[in-house]
Image (cartoon, rainbow, N blue to C red):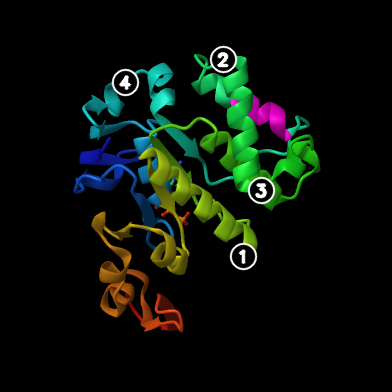
Amino acid sequence: MSLKLEKLTVGYRRRPVFRDLSLPAIEPGALVAVVGPNAVGKSTLLKSIAGLLSMSGRVCLSDDNLTAMPATRRVHRLGYLPQPLPQAIPLVAYETVFSACRSARGDWSRGDTEQAIEQVFETLGIRDLALRRLSEMSGGQRQMVGLAQVLVRQTPLMLLDEPTSALDLHWQLNVLNAVRNATRESGAIALVASHDLNLALRFCDQVLVLAPGGQAVMGPPAEVLTPALLARTYGVDARIETCSRGHPIVLADRPLASR
Ligand SMILES: Nc1ncnc2c1ncn2[C@@H]1O[C@H](COP(=O)(O)OP(=O)(O)OP(=O)(O)O)[C@@H](O)[C@H]1O
């Protein structure tokens, strides 16, 4: 199922963040990093695709217009991880993942639901958290549980807003591996908002760079993330070097006086 964004206009109190934003079709199985400076609109874009903001334009997954779809049907099509960490509630992780799964996959049998939950805890490497209360977890642990709540639904579209912001290096790699495997195995599409350009270079098939003024560029990370683009978009003097294993890495040297 490919994803198409056509002429999206969205904003707050009549102040548009994007006006008539259209993107090339995103193909099934793609992991797309959504990057750009603070306040450029990464969260706004993900929320609008998730149907959480009023907007004009169309978001189509295959032939289905998600914008026109009732929320009860949309929940089968997309999973959304918001930027704020899951709240520190006194429920255990298993219960929250179970209810996230049931809310989107009420048609699954109890056995299938339990199997999907087992699998997601295993894939993310968080089995030891299953019976812990969220109110007794660290921020990073709650972020992992939030991600489990999205992955367990096995939706064809995942919208993840800074899913690694609270995670150490080990868990960042773990999460990006899990999301990449999920997209490759099932043909799902994942849009991942992030400030980490090196994770984008390493894991993502495409990068969508949002720039102030509602501009957007999308393409393979190694082609799109050039020193000129980083200077223009982020206002930094940066280099793209090749590491000892042959992968490109971004090194930002200094802020520029103006963008
Ligand atoms: N609820 C809101 N009401 C009014 N304006 C908002 C609201 N949420 C965001 N904005 C504005 O919309 C613009 C885009 O915000 P958004 O949160 O999408 O940016 P972002 O790229 O995700 O930023 P960051 O990287 O800092 O998380 C900003 O100018 C922000 O001030």
Residue placed most toward the observer, 87 or 167 = 167
Residue placed most toward the observer, 188 or 42 = 188
Can residue 93 be seen here? The reply is: yes
Of callouts 2 and 3, which one flags the residue occurring earlier in the amino acid sequence?
2
Q: Which mark is residue 125?
A: 3
Mark 2 C-beta to ligand 1 under 8 Å: no
Question: Please, what is the three-letter code of the amino acid marked with disc 3?
Answer: Gly
> Is residue 18 placed above or below 194 in the rendered structure?
above
Q: Which residue is painted at 19% across and 48% down in the image?
A: 24
Q: Position of residue 59 (x, y in %)?
A: 26, 34
CB atoms at circles 2 and 4 under 8 Å apart?
A: no
Marks 1 and 4 sit apart, C-alpha to C-alpha, by 38 Å
Residue located beneath label 4 in the image = 69
In front of the other: label 2 or label 1?
2
- Quadrant in the picture for residue 88: top right
Residue range corresponding to the magenta coloring: 93-100
Residue located beneath label 2 in the image = 109
